[in-house]
Image (spheres, coloured by chain):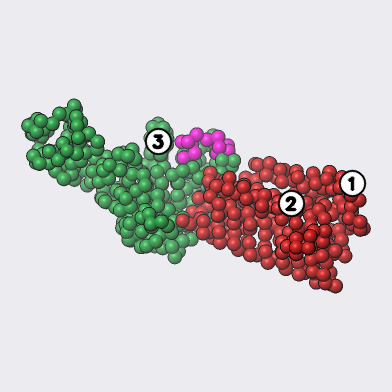
Chain colours: A red, B green
Amino acid sequence: MALLTLARRRAALTARNPRQIAVPLLTPILFATVIAPALQTALGGLGTHIDYTAFVSIGTVGLLVPLATIFAGLSVIVDRDSGAQRELLAAPIPRRLLVFGNLLVALALSALQVAVLVAVAILRGANFDASATGALWFIGASILFTVFMYGVAETMASRMSQQEEYIAATPAVAILPWFFAGALFPIGALPVALTEFAKFLPLTHALALMRYGLLDSHGSGLNDIWGMSSTTAEAFLSLAVVLAFAVAFAALAVRSFTRSAVR
Amino acid sequence: MIDVRALRKTYPGGVEAVRDIDFDVAPGEVFGLLGPNGAGKSTTVGMLTTTIAPTGGSASLAGYDVVRQALDARRVSSVVFQEPVVDRALSGRAHLELHGRLWGVPSSRLAVAIADLVDALRLGELVDRAVGTYSGGERRRLEIARALVSRPRVLFLDEPTVGLDPRIRHELLDVIAGLRGDGEMTILLTTHYLDEAQRLCDRVAIIHLGEIVALDTPHALLAGLGAEILEMRIDGDGPAALAALRARGVANADSFAVGSTLTVPLHDRTAAQAIAVIDAANLAASRITTRTPTLDDVYLRLTGDQMAEAA
């Protein structure tokens, strides 16, 4: 009950700030609808059966979710500096619920944004190849990756005293990994050292799972990571990796928030 | 209802904000915590509302320990914070409903409670507007209404009138005075406006540098200074002049100087007797008046120069 009350409050605040919903969508949609088709025309795509526009559209989910969750984390700082956070801290509820209430809204908002992104990509001509099972892989990976990224954002928000400090850290946290995680090209196209580095990024695993679900039932992205014969086993392994990051950073976020809430 | 024993807060870096304070507040009592800025008032309220962790001692609200039973302690209390603590984009009603739901007010009672408070605090024309459009006084009224939605057994008012213009301040004092009528609620008020404490509080504790330096009813604290006070402005060194008056037996230990202004409780002397001694001591005074003591005098005597800096 308290959790839903907190989520409703966060949703009401978010709804009154449409920029928080629209701005994270702009760059991913630009990539999916303009840059990906242009790259496909100029470079000929991936040279496989996979549609490059669809490939990049999924890749841009890896940009959209971090941007959306970083925005959500910024709201936590605003709450603390000029909002009603102290009233919530004085409420007779476990303080971890404040984190989970915000997380619920971040998940709902990310789901909406991802749906818009995929719809726009389809309208632009992207070809997906999804089954019901595939959609579940996509949804599972998206949810866990969002939980992980929100955990990162909330942890940063709790540990950084000023908005400027938080915003300065955003490119390194939300954008830099995207270039190494196989968003625009398979990780095998990177130099060997960077390919190995990419395998440690949760985003690499999340994107490979999302593509496995919506685009590529052969799981070539998963195979680039694990090199195993069973795609299903690779998918479960990558899901476990993203799950581990999600659980670890959600726990870290709760710990950071509750520690920062009490001086 | 509020029980504080040897409560201490030392912040990282060694700053001792609160040093082993003791006090208790009876059910239905209005208790004032007075002190200059930085005296430790807000830290004390922070510990009692479980947003600051004590480093020593104990405190309880309605029998619930604020550390070991923090949820229960929060369930029986509400706070009106010193700074605005609102979501500017949300309506006043959304704030009232949020508080009611988080404090577990049954839905059947919540609408009635909100309607009553909106009426009592004259929020009718405001309550469905975004709080960002409220004036300072309107926002304060909303915050008081919010704190009352859950009918707390303990209400904390942390400098509730700071920064408000005099008219709105007096309106709010009237609202707070109205809360006294509800004998079920215990109120802890922090302020550095002495007239507020004198008007509202059954007892006051004066806190200075993290320690309680006086605790009694306003009447008893005033009685300690006698019936009349002589106040004089000296052309020269105030503390030196005070020392001269003390040497001549006119000023007791409860006299004090703030800058060039001396405040001398007369006790069993008359003003004429005191002025004669001042003349004999060749003290050049530009202004001499007599008046009855106020809580300001008690406060200034106990907190000295720091109060002057804070004022």
Determine the chain carrying the residue at label 3.
B
Residue under the point 91% across and 51% down = A44
Gap between marks 1 and 3 measured at Cα: 70 Å
> Which disc, if any, is residue B169?
3
Residue under the point 82% across and 61% down = A188
Determine the chain carrying the residue at label 2.
A
Which residue matches tag 1?
A: A42
Question: 10 Å neighbourhood of mark 2: few (<14), some, or many (≥20)?
Answer: many
Amino acid type at image mark 1: Ala
Which residue matches tag 2?
A: A63
Is A110 on the left-hand or right-hand side of B127? right
Asked which secondary structure carries label 2, the reply is helix
Question: 10 Å neighbourhood of mark 1: few (<14), some, or many (≥20)?
Answer: few
Rendering coords of residue A185 (x, y %): 82, 55
Residue A124 position (above or below residue B291): below
Q: Which residues are magenta?
A: B126-141
Asked which secondary structure carries label 1, the reply is helix
Is A16 on the left-hand or right-hand side of B225? right
From the viewer's side, name the closer residue of B194 and B306: B306
Residue under the point 27% across and 45% down = B303
Which is in the foreground here, disc 3 or disc 2? 2
From the viewer's side, name the closer residue of A196 and B186: A196
Determine the chain carrying the residue at label 1.
A
From the viewer's side, name the closer residue of A245 and A102: A245
- For the image, the number of numbered tags is 3
Amino acid type at image mark 3: Arg
Residue under the point 75% across and 43% down = A26
Which image quadrant: the N terminus of chain B?
bottom left
Gap between marks 3 and 2 measured at Cα: 51 Å
Rendering coords of residue A28 (x, y %): 77, 47
